[in-house]
Amino acid sequence: MISFNPTLKHMKFVSTVTIFHLSLLLHVFNEGPSPFATALSATPSEAASRNLLTLQQSLASMANKLTLSPEIIIPEPTDPTALLLQSTEITKLSHAIRTRAKANAAFISGSINSVRIFCREQETAMGNFPAPLPVIYCESSIEENVSMTDLADAGASGYLYSLLKGEEISSADDLKNDSVLKDHFDLAIQNGLQLIPEVVLEPNKEWKEED
């Protein structure tokens, strides 16, 4: 029997201040974008503004409780039978993450097609409870050089960007070495997305409040 099994790489537990997974995620939001880029009449800046509001509400807990935003790795099947099952399985996964896991957002690592299927299922919950989850795309080895235009068209709300390609940083000054961060922020806003930087902190470094 051939099966198609998307996997949960790890969970991101979100509090009002920080996000913990294997490293510390700092969510830095630009003034701008929105949630589902399916509103074809919306301009990129309007979409960006809506996505900003949606992500702020989803990735923060007003009650100071942990929230669940899983990162999901969706493999790209090569077997013909598995390819036929892909859309159905991703749709089931999307529904379960929203209704059974009660997640606040979904971080998706996979192909553009996988993101599109996941977002399409989320959009079916418009006007219902639980409401659609914002989808944040994570860079993956499954499909390289994914354009933000394609992600916006697929329905993603954000793009997880690994600062310094995931290198550990020991001071805030290290962030200045990422010469393309500003370009990625601008490109995201131009396409109605929100860029979410991922910062990996040097584990043996003692961070003080002023840092």
Image (tube, rainbow, N blue to C red):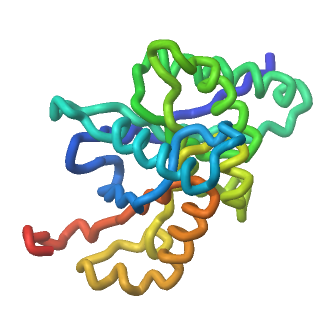
Q: Position of residue 146 (x, y in %)?
A: 71, 59
Q: Residue at x 35, y 56 (%)?
A: 27
Residue 70 visible in the shown view: yes
Q: To which quarter of the image does residue 61 belong?
A: top left
Q: Is residue 23 left or right of residue 130?
A: left
Residue 124 or 116: which is nearer the viewer? 124
In the displayed structure, would residue 51 be above or below residue 145?
above
Q: Is residue 26 left or right of residue 34?
A: left
The furthest residue to the left: 209
Residue 55 or 25: which is nearer the viewer? 55
Q: Is residue 52 left or right of residue 140?
A: left
Q: Position of residue 51 (x, y in %)?
A: 49, 45
Residue 148 or 21: which is nearer the viewer? 148
Q: Residue at x 55, y 61 (%)?
A: 189
Q: Residue at x 56, y 56 (%)?
A: 45
Q: Is residue 145 left or right of residue 139?
A: right
Residue 100 or 1: which is nearer the viewer? 100
Q: Position of residue 148 (x, y in %)?
A: 66, 58
Q: To which quarter of the image does residue 188 belong?
A: bottom right
Q: Residue at x 9, y 74 (%)?
A: 210
Give the number of callouts. Answer: 0
In the displayed structure, would residue 115 be above or below residue 200?
above
Image quarter of the C terminus: bottom left
Q: Position of residue 202 (x, y in %)?
A: 27, 71
Image quarter of the N terminus: top right
Residue 115 visible in the shown view: no
The furthest residue to the right: 80
